[in-house]
Amino acid sequence: MPDTFEVQAEPLTPEAFAPFGQVIAAGDMVMELRDGEAFHLNVLSYDRQPLECDHLNRHHKATQALVALAGRPTLVVVAPREHDFSARDHLSSVRAFVCDGTAGINLALGTWHWGPYPLMDHVDLVNVQGKGFADDNEVAHLTRDLGVVVTVRL
C-alpha cells in the first residue's frame, strides 16, 4: 500500500491559480504553442471516482485549456514546473483547486496536473491542447516511483 499525502482543496481564484496558469472566466486567455505545434480540440468524459492521484502529467509545447460543460464542479491537482517529482519533498508543492463550474482553467506550459475530475457523478470537459499531445506528455509516477498517493480533502 502506498503512503498517503493529503492536500486540502481550495477555491479556484485567479490569484491562487496564477503560478499554474489562468482562470479562463477572468479576462483574456493566452494560449501558447511552441515548436510548430497546432491546437487539438476534443471533449473528455469522466465519471466520479475517489480523489486519489497516483501520477501527474505535464506538457511542454502547448498550454492546455479545460472547461467543464453544464457548469459541473470539478477538482484539479497541480504542481509547479520547477519540480520533477524525483523526491518526496517535491510533494509539498502540490495544490488542489475546486472549480465550481463557473470557470475553466488554462494550464501553463510545464505545469504538472491531474484532472479536472468530477465532484458529482459525471463531467464532460472541453479540452484544447496541442495536436501532438501524445508525444508531449511527461508523466511523474507518484505511486510507482515514490510510493505515494495524493489524496484531496474537500
Image (spheres, grey):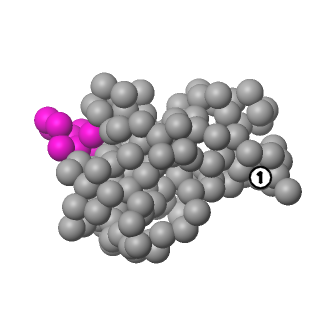
Q: How far across and how far down the image is residue 9, in percent?
A: 47, 40
Closer to the camera, 104 or 129? 104
Q: Residue at point 38% right, 56% down?
A: 74
User: Does 24 lie within the magenta span?
Assistant: yes
Neighbourhood count class around disc 1 (C-alpha, 10 Å): few under 14, some 14–19, many 20 upward: some
Closer to the camera, 102 or 135? 102
Q: Is residue 14 above or below residue 121?
A: above
Describe residue 93's horizontal placement relative to residue 111 as left or right: right
Quadrant of the image occupied by residue 85:
top right
Describe residue 55's horizontal placement relative to residue 45 as left or right: right
Q: Residue at point 64% right, 28% down?
A: 92
Q: How far across and how far down the image is residue 120, in percent?
A: 39, 66
Q: How far across and how far down the image is residue 98, in percent?
A: 38, 46
Query: Predominant secondary structure in magenta?
Result: loop
- The answer, for residue 37, to whether it is visible in the render is no
- Please name the amino acid that badge 1 sits on: Thr
The residue at which mark 1 appears reads as 143
Residue at the outermost front position? 154
User: Does 96 lie within the magenta span?
Assistant: no
Q: How far across and how far down the image is residue 81, in percent?
A: 55, 32
Q: Secondary structure at mark 1?
A: helix
Q: Which stretch appears magenta?
A: 23-33
The quarter in which the N terminus is drawn is bottom right
- The answer, for residue 56, to whether it is visible in the render is yes
Closer to the camera, 58 or 3? 3
Describe residue 6's horizontal placement relative to residue 30 as left or right: right
Q: Is residue 132 above or below residue 84?
A: below
Residue at the outermost right position? 1
Describe residue 84's horizontal placement relative to residue 48 as left or right: right
Q: Residue at point 78% right, 32% down?
A: 87
